[in-house]
Structure formats: C-alpha cells, structure tokens
Image (tube, helix red, strand yellow):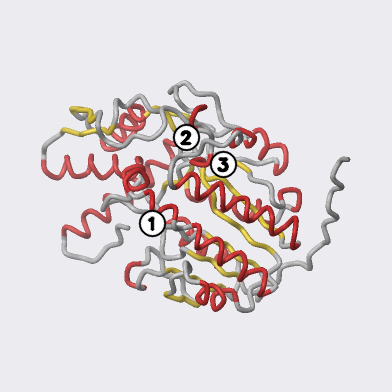
C-alpha cells in the first residue's frame, strides 16, 4: 500500500521580530548566515557557539550572542527557548586533514543534532534546518577523478566517509523522522565545499581553497616560490562561494516541497586541485614550483554536485564562478595574513 503524502499546513509569514536561532555562529558558514539574516532586517537573532566571543569570525551588531556547547542537552533547551526557526550548523569539523585524523570527534557531533532537534521540537519551533555534507555520499561512487556528479539518491546504499560522513547521514535520518513522526518541518542541505571570506584559513581545519591561498601568500612573503600539494593534485571537487551558500539555506528552509528531503547545495563547476592551484597562481601573479605529498590526507578521488533537483524545485542554483569567488577569498586571506604579521589578533579557526 502506497504511503499517503502528509498534508503540509501553511505557516504564518515569518515576522521580522520572530526569533531565529543559529548554532555554530562563531564559525564560517553560520557566522555569515547570521549576517545574512541581519541584513535582511530580522531583529531577533540568537547566535550560538562554544568558542569564546573573541574567537568568533563575525560579530553582527544587535545580535544576541551565547557561548554555549550545544552537544549538551540542557544548553540546547536554553538555546531554543522561544525560537520560531532554528538553523543548526554546529559541528566539530574542518578540512580533509581534520576529518580524516579526528573521526571520533566528528562522530560525536551527532550529540549536537540529537539534542538540538529535540529542543527545537519541544520549544515549538516551526522550522529546523540541518547542515549536512556531501561526505554523506557513497564513497564507492567517488573513486575516479572523472566522477559523474552526485545526485541526492546516491547516498544509498550507504557507504559514507568514515566518521564525519556517517554522522551526517545518521543526523539526516533524525531530521526526517522528526517530520514523519512528530510533524516538525525539517530541512536538510548537503554542502559541497564552501569557501570564502571570514572562514578558516590556517591551523589545520582549513579547506583546500583557503589552504592553497595561504600557502601562496606565505611563499610570496618568504620569497620561496614552492608549494606542497596533498595527493597528486588530480583529485576533483566543486567549490561553493559563501554568498551562494547562505542564500541557498534561506531558499531551502522556506520551501515546503523540501521538508525532510536532503538536497545538494553546491556548485556544479568541478575542477582538479591542480587547476585550483593554477587559479590562485593567476590571482597572485606568480608561478609556483609544485611538489606532491602522496601520504597526506586527500579524501575521495572525485566529487561534484548534480544540481538537477535544486534547479527543478527552486529554479536556482549556486552560480558564483570559482574565479570570482577565489579572487575575493585570496584578497581577504592576504589581508588577514598581513594583519597577523603586524601583531594584530585575527581569526583562523
């Protein structure tokens, strides 16, 4: 017998003074999401992160900032008090070097979503967004740099990346069941390599666009034009600019066709790591001498986002070109590097 489709009740329009809660707000994506909603005119935003305030990337005027660890149930209850919409982007994660070496820490992030979705439900929140990842996809489909783009159904049969990917896949299921069993409208976006200003650029948690930019900036500063690349440089990825990401989160969370339905949120512009290095060289006006560390963490051989579904439902997709986004990102990281060298405090991750 075919399961009947749940009737979706229409929400009241979101008011500018309704409380929006965003976790992970001391970090890159969530920090930019706080600024995005503030710029749209929302006046009650509660930003949450376990890091002390001085380590947050962005401080947005007029926002309620809480320093709380949302892996703890009691803190989640406090965070969700009075919330109309909850955006859960908190996680212990980083670039490939981090998620391959600290799988237990990545897995423990399941505590965050487990407690946050329950707290949001108990608080009577109308909508709950969960930040998933393309790391949830079956790794057997990503063994060739010339991989076909991954569509949403490719997460099953499940063979996610160890640690981080499995946590994302299991947390997605929590979100889906809170809709099917309890009626909480949940929304799930699988991020594909987000980059841009106000992100991690040093310290071991940075992703490839930031790491390569920093390495080139350091090389120029030291007048030693050599760069070490993790893997053979032929690994392929797509990279999504931060402005596209936060706009996509907003669109997805306010589309009732996407309730409890994982969807790709990423660029479909796939490049190799070597090509990414070449793009940064062009921005910097330099040619680097490349060496390759074949023993370094490098993740799957290839990954790209199939945007057929998001185009179909939202009539939109991330469209900032890598050339455009990397030019802005490189300039911001160069500014941070110079400030740090001058003795100023800067955020790194």
Of the two numbered discs 3 and 2 in the rendering, the one whose residue sits closer to the viewer: 2
> Is 99 placed above or below 70 here?
above
Q: Which mark is residue 318?
A: 3
View extreme (front): residue: 1
Query: Mark 1 highlights which residue?
Result: 198
View extreme (left): residue: 223
Query: Mark 2 highlights which residue?
Result: 238
**Crowding at mark 2 (Cα within 10 Å: few <14, some 14-19, many 20+):** many
Residue drawn where x is 37% and y is 42% of the image: 327
Q: Quadrant of the C terminus?
A: bottom left
Q: Is disc 3 in contact with disc 2, using a CB cutoff of under 8 Å? A: no
Alpha-carbon span between mark 2 and mark 1: 19 Å
Image mark count: 3
Residue drawn where x is 41% and y is 57% of the image: 92
Question: Percent x, y for residue 299?
Answer: 38, 35
> Is 85 placed above or below 289 here?
below
In front of the other: 124 or 226: 124
């Amino acid at each position: 017998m075919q399961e009947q489709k749940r009737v979706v009740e229409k929400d009241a329009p979101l008011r500018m003074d309704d409380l929006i809660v965003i976790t992970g707000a001391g970090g890159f994506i969530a920090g930019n999401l706080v600024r995005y909603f503030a710029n749209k005119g929302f006046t009650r935003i509660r930003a949450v992160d376990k890091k002390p305030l001085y380590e947050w990337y962005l401080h947005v005027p007029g926002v309620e900032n809480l320093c709380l660890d949302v892996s703890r149930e009691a803190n989640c209850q406090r965070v969700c008090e009075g919330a109309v919409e909850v955006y859960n982007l908190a996680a212990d994660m980083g670039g490939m070097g981090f998620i391959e070496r600290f799988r237990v820490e990545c897995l423990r992030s399941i505590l965050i979503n487990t407690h946050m979705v329950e707290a949001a439900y108990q608080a009577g929140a109308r909508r709950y967004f969960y930040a998933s990842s393309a790391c949830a996809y079956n790794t057997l489909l990503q063994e060739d740099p010339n991989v076909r783009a991954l569509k949403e159904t490719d997460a099953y049969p499940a063979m996610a990346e160890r640690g981080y990917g499995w946590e994302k896949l299991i947390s997605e299921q929590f979100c889906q069941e809170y809709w099917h069993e309890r009626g909480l409208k949940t929304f799930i976006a699988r991020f594909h390599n987000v980059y841009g200003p106000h992100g991690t650029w040093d310290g071991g948690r940075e992703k490839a666009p930031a790491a390569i930019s920093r390495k080139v900036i350091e090389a120029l500063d030291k007048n030693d034009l050599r760069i070490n690349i993790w893997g053979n440089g032929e690994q392929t990825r797509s990279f999504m600019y931060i402005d596209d990401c936060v706009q996509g989160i907003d669109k997805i969370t306010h589309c009732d066709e996407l309730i409890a339905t994982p969807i790709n949120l990423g660029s479909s512009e796939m490049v190799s790591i070597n090509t990414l290095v070449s793009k940064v060289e062009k921005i910097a006006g330099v040619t680097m001498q490349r060496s390759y560390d074949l023993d370094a963490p490098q993740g799957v051989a290839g990954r790209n986002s199939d945007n057929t579904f998001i185009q179909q439902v939202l009539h939109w997709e991330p469209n900032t070109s890598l050339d455009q986004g990397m030019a802005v990102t490189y300039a911001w990281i160069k500014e941070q590097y110079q400030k740090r060298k001058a003795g100023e405090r800067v955020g790194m991750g």
